[in-house]
Amino acid sequence: MAMKVSLLDAAERLRQEALTVLDPKTQSDLGQFFTPASAASLIASMVVLPDSGHIKILDPGAGTGVLTAALAARIINDYPDLAADFVAVERDDDVVPFLSETLRHIEDSSNGRIRTQLVSADFILETVGLMPKLNLDSSFDVVIQNPPYGKLPVNSAHRKAMRIFGVDAPNLYAAFLTLSLASLKTGGQLVAITPRSFFNGPYFVDFRRHFLKHLGLSRIHVFDSRSTVFSDTGVLQENIIFSGIKNQTRDSVTLSVSESQIDVPRERVVPFSEVVHPGDPHQFIRLATNGEDTKVAEIMLSQPCTLNDLGIEVSTGKVVDFRLRESTFHRPVEGGKPLIYPSNMKSSGVVWPVVSKKPQWFLPADAKAETLLMPSGWYTLVKRFSSKEEKRRIVASIWNPTENPDPVAFENHLNVFHQKGQPLDELLAKGLGVWLNSEVVDKFFRTFSGHTQVNATDIRNMRFPDLETLRSLGAQSLTRAEEPSVKLMELIA
Ligand SMILES: C[S@@+](CC[C@H](N)C(=O)[O-])C[C@H]1O[C@@H](n2cnc3c(N)ncnc32)[C@H](O)[C@@H]1O
């Protein structure tokens, strides 16, 4: 145990030192968010190690080597008959000396049982692409990683290299996970900490299919509160840790949750079909981490309609204000129409005009701008980005034309519900608002989305009650003021 502490302590000291000397711009460009020791221990604890023999372990994007150190510590302390070869790949020359120091320390502490190799190279370009120098294919028993984050522009060398490999990876971590899968033997284990965005992000479809085809997910761990893991590096993404076995079919998945990396996780085992619904063309990965979540998912999935079935469309507000400066006004203008922003959405409904830094009037300067106005009538609105302070991820409100019978312009940070560009009827608009603001919808959304963004695609993929139920929810909202979720449960029970 003492050894474990000292190995990890040394790695943590090197991590802290590296954070103080590295250039912040390079850190951001290369996605350098080094794992704190406590999280590294948790990640390393998820690797299932054999009692004896010799295994090969890969740590791509190794940074200062804290994950390798955490796993090596386990082997040294708890697996006296096991030997391991670690390969740590790192691209940044400024980080390499720290990594080299960590690896040296591991070897020195291992009594000859652990060998390490530092590969100072670009994991993507040197593994795939036109002139690959590294051949890591199918030779590893374990990959442990906290890969770099960051988008891969469509024409970047890295993105092209991945396309040559056969998987379109929209960002660095998707590329790293894809290549990590390729480097594993069949039956080998992948353990990684990554942002949760690939679980349902629309850009990740290609990657997700490839990932789920080749990896049998055995465990997914989420943190209850955002940003705890990398709080000292400023990362606000919601992170997950997962492990899986290459080319294994799974019937069940262990889901675990902890408040932070030092708590004891709460665990539950769920059928794989609850995590990835059979036949789901998008292959979303959903997380129902407790029994209530499962009930919520069941209620949602048993709803009879999609938006399409209801004849309702959802689109982002058409007004992109910085492109339409001539048509937007901060003060009333003759003929000016309401311009609605998320900040106009209050708990009582949409309030207009409000005192705001945003312009509140829209007077089309030309024929093109004219087409951005929606006809007078009822519309349901949902914020595209909820703020961290907001209790709900999905925040809906209603545009009421009786207060303002003019045509209306909606700004681009809103999702707008309409029927072929025409308004909804009053009860439908209100019923949709009640449904979308309900606890059941919010909880369902959380099981499936890790970020505060609510994309129109996410909404299109959700299920809804039928028109009659929605209208009856709308009618009740006129006369009763209690929590919408209570009424909902009565109605859809
Ligand atoms: C998120 S950090 C994590 C580092 C380390 N695994 C940890 O957990 O602390 C990702 C690391 O990948 C490195 N990196 C970024 N792009 C890379 C590439 N194309 N090839 C190899 N390493 C890369 C970065 O320099 C950084 O050290």
Image: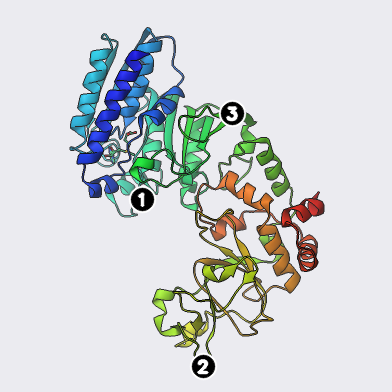
Tag in front: 2 or 1: 2
The numbered disc on residue 151 is: 1
Q: Which residue is nearer to you in this view: 433 or 305?
A: 433
**Ligand 1 is found in which quarter of the picture?**
top left
Q: Is residue 70 above or below residue 81?
A: below
Q: Amino acid at mark 2?
A: Glu
Q: Earlier in the sequence, mark 3 or mark 2?
A: 3
Q: Amino acid at mark 1?
A: Lys
Q: Which residue is nearer to you in this view: 196 or 359?
A: 359
Q: Which residue is mark 3?
A: 267
Looking at the rendering, in which quadrant would you find the N terminus? top left
Image side of residue 385 versus residue 420, left or right? left
- CA gap, disc 1 and disc 3: 32 Å
Which quadrant would residue 71 be assigned to in this image?
top left
Identify the secondary structure beneath mark 3.
Answer: strand
Residue 216: image x %, image y %?
Answer: 52, 30
Residue 200: image x %, image y %?
Answer: 53, 47
- How many marks are shown on the rendered structure? 3
Q: Amino acid at mark 3?
A: Glu
The numbered disc on residue 189 is: none
Q: Residues within 10 Å of mark 2 (few under 14, many from 20)?
A: few
Image side of residue 268 versus residue 321, left or right? right
Q: Earlier in the sequence, mark 1 or mark 3?
A: 1
Residue at image position (24%, 16%) is: 107
Residue 63: image x %, image y %?
Answer: 28, 34
Q: Which residue is mark 2?
A: 334
